[in-house]
Image (spheres, rainbow, N blue to C red):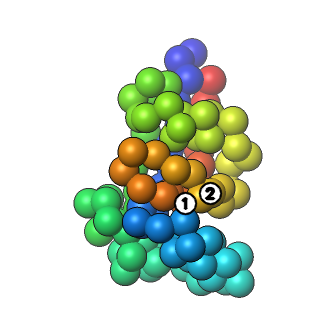
Amino acid sequence: MAKKAAARHILVDSQQTCEELKRQIEEGADFAALAREHSKCPSGKQGGELGEFGPGQMVPEFDRVVFSAPVGTVEGPVKTQFGYHLLEVTSRVG
């Protein structure tokens, strides 16, 4: 079976903002609500949902986290060419 994962993320411009949002999530804030409010990615409108994808479909920094982090944990800040991400793997197979 081919590897596949589903994830959601919040993309912001600064590491400081990313860390602050992660703290809010750890204190019980809703990931999807924060994504809709703060994410610079169009996926923010869907609560940060990126859908399902395989290895190599996202930037390498993203792939590393999505295919290694425990499902259901919020990881980050993860720096890419686009900015700073909080990532949550919502499912993974393969």
Q: Position of residue 90 (x, y in %)?
A: 58, 51
Residue at position x 48%, y 58% from top? 84
- Binning the other alpha carbons within 10 Å of mark 1 as few (below 14), some (14 to 19) or many (20 upward) gives many
Please tell me which residue lies in front, 85 or 79. Answer: 79
Q: Which residue in the protein does label 1 denote? A: 86
Please tell me which residue lies in front, 80 or 55. Answer: 80
Residue 29 falls in which quadrant of the image?
Answer: bottom right
Residue lying farthest left? 42
- Residue 16 in the image: above or below residue 69: below
Which kind of residue does numbered mark 2 sit on? Answer: Gly
Q: Position of residue 70 (x, y in %)?
A: 73, 46
Query: Which numbered circle lies on residue 76?
Result: 2
Find out whether the residues at labels 1 and 2 contact each other: C-beta distance under 8 Å: yes
Residue at position x 57%, y 15% from top? 1
Cα–Cα span, label 1 and label 2: 5 Å
Which kind of residue does numbered mark 1 sit on? Answer: Leu
Residue 72 falls in which quadrant of the image?
Answer: bottom right
Tell whether 26 sits left or right of 92.
right
